[in-house]
């Protein structure tokens, strides 16, 4: 008789606990909502950071490329650039290599080499009072040319960035 009573109790109890209670379901939904909200915030932050890093990287690559092109031509010049005829600063410098001339110009829209844009269309030079400064040495050593500019990427707030570039170059042949 005791066994029969226990069987009925077990049968009755097991039929009652088939699903989850409403409270358990609400707790799980709440926890999933909290995890989803925090994950979405982190994901959006990572996307914004990625756009900013890509913008800075683009400015750095283009600026380094333009700087390398100017340094290479100035170093290989046969004679001192026209800028160094009288020590001064300018937005334009002309160098002569093997009888051919190359003119670099800093404009608000970018840096050009004989009219070809070295910095692309979505980058600009900011604060460009003078990109090229010539420091002549009175003892006869080659002049030193300082190239300095700040390159800026335009666009929406997340993809804006700016980096300064500066270097000194002396002629290789003197």
Image: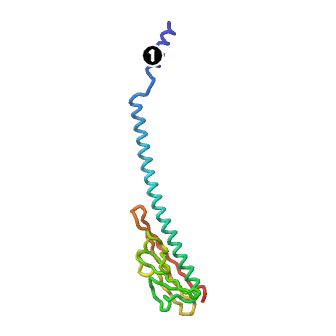
- If the image is split into quadrants, where does the C terminus sit? bottom right
Tell me: residue 57, above or below residue 8.
below
Tell me: residue 37, above or below residue 53.
above
Colour logic:
rainbow
Q: In which quadrant of the rendered view does residue 30 lie? A: top left
Badge 1 density bin: few <14, some 14–19, many ≥20, Cα 10 Å: few
SS assignment at label 1: helix
Residue of label 1 = 12
Q: Residue furthest top?
A: 1
Tell me: residue 149, above or below residue 4.
below
Q: Position of residue 164 (x, y in %)?
A: 47, 73
Residue depicted at 45% across the width and 51% down the height: 43
Q: Where is residue 146 in the image (x, y as percent from the top left)?
A: 50, 82
Q: Closer to the camera, 14 or 105?
A: 105
Tell me: residue 147, above or below residue 142.
above
Q: Closer to the camera, 39 or 107?
A: 107
Q: Position of residue 4 (x, y in %)?
A: 50, 9
Q: Where is residue 27 in the image (x, y as percent from the top left)?
A: 40, 35
Q: Closer to the camera, 21 or 64?
A: 64
- The image shows a total of numbered marks equal to 1
Q: Residue furthest bottom?
A: 139
């Amino acid at each position: 008789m005791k066994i029969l009573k226990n069987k009925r109790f077990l049968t009755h109890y097991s039929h009652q606990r088939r699903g989850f209670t409403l409270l358990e379901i609400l707790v799980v939904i709440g926890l999933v909502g909290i995890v989803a909200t925090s994950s979405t915030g982190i994901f959006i932050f990572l996307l914004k950071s990625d756009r900013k890093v890509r913008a800075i990287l683009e400015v750095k690559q283009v600026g380094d490329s333009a700087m390398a092109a100017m340094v290479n031509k100035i170093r290989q010049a046969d004679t001192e650039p026209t800028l160094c005829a009288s020590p001064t600063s300018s937005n334009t410098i002309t160098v002569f290599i093997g009888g051919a001339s190359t003119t670099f110009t800093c404009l608000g829209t970018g840096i050009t080499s004989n009219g070809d844009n070295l910095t692309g269309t979505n980058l600009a030079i900011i604060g460009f009072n003078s990109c090229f400064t010539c420091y002549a040495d009175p003892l006869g050593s080659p002049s030193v040319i300082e190239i300095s500019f700040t390159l800026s990427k335009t666009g929406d707030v997340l993809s804006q960035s700016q980096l300064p570039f500066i270097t000194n170059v002396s002629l290789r042949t003197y």
